[in-house]
Image (cartoon, grey):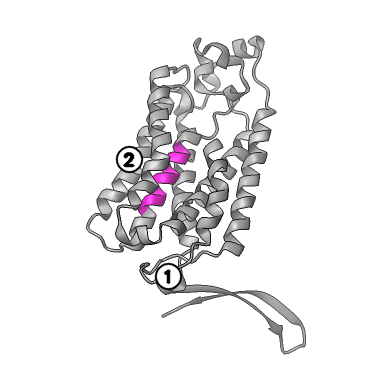
């Protein structure tokens, strides 16, 4: 999470990057006055979630001894007792570079590169949106990690992080990064012949990440499925919410007025261009 807060302030200025004559048309509309407060708010929620996580209690030896893998749902039971430092290391070498490589690859596209400040601002907001959901979930949900059902893990067995199995943050962050990159590439290059390869890579990398977390005994299958789904959803939905009406044919605008009976009304008008 530290890298997110380190990027937070620079991200605000990315939203405000002025357009130049050389810039390609962007499929997104961002406004500093709107997106900066949203990004700050998401960062604050992430911070609150981290605080809640830090206040959780670990298990004592009596509680550890009482754990029984037969209490784990059948579809997750095959993971109970797994433990591998190697798998954990491999997973770390996937997630952290991916967070930089995925948006970095977008810079290879000339159109994206001309709007790179805007894209990085959106990426920051997307990561923070996922992490806000993740930290608040982990901070309020207690689920024991799979390795606790075995005998390995050393001091981590009594740590509060041993109760953070739901949901898989490494998988979620990896999916957020890869699906964001695929979504942005698609929006800048609709109909590109490279799209099948781009989307396949976006789907495979977080799946491999999920496998390492299962082997490491950090998360159950269901934790990874949820993490994958949340990350992929955030990676696609946040950029989609910023799509311009010219690209989507959709527009949302506030409306207010008086009806025939003299009562005032207000709301949002959704229009679709035919």
What quarter of the picture does the N terminus occupy? Answer: top right
**Residue 229 at what x, y percent from top left?**
46, 44
* Placement of 116 over or under 132, stated as above or below: below
Nearer to me, 95 or 110: 110
Residue 22 higher or lower than 39, as above or below: below
In x, y percent, where is residue 247? Answer: 40, 70
State the image quarter where residue 27 is shown: bottom left
Left or right, residue 50 beside residue 195: right
Of mark 1 and mark 2, the one earlier in the sequence is 2
- Distance in Å between CA atoms under marks 1 and 2: 28 Å
- Is residue 225 in view? no
Mark 2 secondary-structure assignment? helix
10 Å crowding of disc 1: few (<14), some (14-19), many (20+): few
Q: In terms of image quadrants, where is residue 34?
A: bottom right
Q: Which residue in the structure is indicated by mark 2?
A: 204
Quarter residue 221 falls in: top left
The residue at 37%/61% (across/down) is: 114
Left or right of 165 in this view: 207: left
Query: Is-magenta flag for residue 175?
Result: yes
Residue at image position (53%, 35%) is 167
Magenta stretch, main secondary structure class: helix
Element class at badge 1:
helix
Q: Is residue 206 magenta?
A: no
Q: How many dots with numbers?
A: 2
Q: Which of 274/40 is in front?
A: 40
Farthest bottom residue?
260
Quadrant assignment for the C terminus: bottom left
Magenta segment, which residues? 171-182
The residue labelled by disc 1 is: 248
Q: Is residue 248 visible?
A: yes
């Amino acid at each position: 999470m530290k890298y997110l807060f380190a990027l937070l302030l620079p991200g605000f200025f990315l939203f405000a990057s002025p357009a130049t004559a050389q810039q390609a048309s962007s499929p997104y509309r961002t406004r500093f006055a709107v997106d900066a407060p949203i990004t700050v708010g998401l960062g604050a929620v992430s911070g609150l979630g981290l605080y809640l996580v830090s206040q959780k209690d670990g298990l004592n030896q009596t509680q550890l001894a009482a754990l029984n893998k037969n209490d784990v749902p059948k579809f997750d039971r095959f993971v109970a007792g797994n433990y591998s430092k190697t798998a954990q290391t491999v997973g770390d070498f996937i997630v952290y570079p991916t967070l930089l490589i995925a948006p970095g690859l977008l810079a290879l596209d000339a159109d994206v590169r001309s709007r790179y400040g805007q894209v990085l601002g959106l990426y920051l907001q997307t990561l923070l949106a996922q992490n806000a959901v993740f930290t608040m979930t982990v901070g309020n949900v207690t689920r024991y990690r799979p390795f606790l059902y075995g005998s390995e893990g050393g001091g981590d067995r009594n740590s509060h992080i041993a109760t953070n199995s739901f949901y898989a943050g490494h998988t979620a962050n990896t999916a957020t990064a890869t699906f964001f990159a695929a979504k942005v590439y698609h929006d800048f290059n609709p109909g590109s012949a490279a799209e099948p390869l781009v989307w396949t890579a976006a789907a495979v990398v977080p799946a491999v990440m999920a496998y390492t977390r299962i082997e490491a005994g950090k998360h159950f299958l269901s934790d990874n499925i949820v993490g994958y789904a949340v990350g992929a959803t955030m990676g696609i939905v946040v950029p989609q919410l910023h799509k311009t009406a010219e690209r989507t044919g959709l527009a949302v605008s506030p409306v207010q007025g008086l009806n025939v009976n003299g009562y005032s009304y207000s709301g949002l008008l959704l229009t679709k261009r035919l």
